């Protein structure tokens, strides 16, 4: 009988220890679940913020591209104007070219040769980029060039 009491007591003690361990595990699991819930909320907030920042960045990039395109809308590229970059004044060449179109280039407009590598002998003449201060002037010159019998790649 003593052996039986001893074994029952030992089993009861072991089951209490297991119960305490299970309760400790339950508390740890509850703590881990609450931490995990907090991390999920923080992660979701971060993802939402990152998506918002991505949309904002795309909007800004589109805005910058739009501004760049609008700033170039007053530019007119003239291809194949004969002559070399060192040959006379570019402004004089353009005045002569636009005289045929009955246009006067405003002194404040600027013109420059388009960037590209040095041309070899017999290569096409360099392109010229002409900036008008007003889009209406550019539109007028394009309309005048279309309606005039002047070849577009050579001055009159």
Image: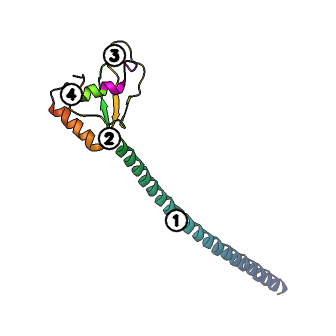
**Which circle's residue, 2 or 3, is located before the other in the chain?**
2
Which quarter of the rendering shows the C terminus?
top left
- Residue 120 drawn in magenta: no
SS at circle 1: helix
- Which residue in the structure is indicated by mark 1? 44
Residue 52 tag number:
none
Q: Does 140 appear above or below 36?
A: above
Work out how far the residue at label 1 is from the one at label 4, CA to CA, in angstroms: 66 Å
Camera-nearest label, 2 or 4: 4
**Which circle's residue, 3 or 4, is located before the other in the chain?**
4
Q: Does 41 appear above or below 50?
A: below
Camera-nearest label, 3 or 1: 3
Residue depicted at 39% across the width and 48% down the height: 67
Tag 2–tag 4 contact (CB < 8 Å): no
Residue furthest to the top in view is 121
SS at circle 3: loop
Q: Nearer the viewer, residue 81 or 115?
A: 81
Camera-nearest label, 3 or 4: 4
Residue furthest to the right in view is 2
Residue depicted at 55% across the width and 69% down the height: 41
Residue 123 tag number:
3
Residue 74 tag number:
2
**Which circle's residue, 1 or 4, is located before the other in the chain?**
1
Q: Does 128 appear above or below 40?
A: above
SS at circle 4: loop
Residue depicted at 51% across the width and 62% down the height: 49
* Mark 3 neighbour class, 10 Å CA radius: few under 14, some 14 to 19, many 20 or more: few
| Residue interval drawn in magenta | 84-93
Residue 100 tag number:
4
Work out how far the residue at label 2 is from the one at label 3, CA to CA, in angstroms: 28 Å
């Amino acid at each position: 009988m003593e052996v039986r009491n001893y074994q029952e007591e030992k089993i009861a003690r072991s089951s209490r220890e297991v119960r305490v361990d299970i309760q400790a595990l339950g508390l740890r699991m509850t703590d881990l679940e609450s931490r995990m819930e907090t991390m999920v909320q923080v992660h979701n907030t971060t993802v939402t913020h990152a998506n918002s920042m991505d949309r904002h960045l795309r909007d800004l990039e589109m805005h910058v591209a739009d501004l760049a395109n609008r700033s170039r809308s007053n530019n007119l590229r003239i291809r194949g104007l004969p002559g070399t970059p060192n040959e006379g004044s570019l402004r004089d060449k353009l005045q002569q070219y636009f005289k045929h179109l009955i246009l006067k280039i405003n002194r404040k407009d600027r013109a420059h040769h388009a960037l590209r590598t040095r041309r070899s002998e017999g290569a096409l003449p360099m392109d010229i980029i002409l900036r008008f201060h007003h889009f209406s002037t550019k539109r007028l010159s394009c309309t005048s060039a279309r309606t005039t019998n002047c070849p577009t790649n050579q001055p009159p």
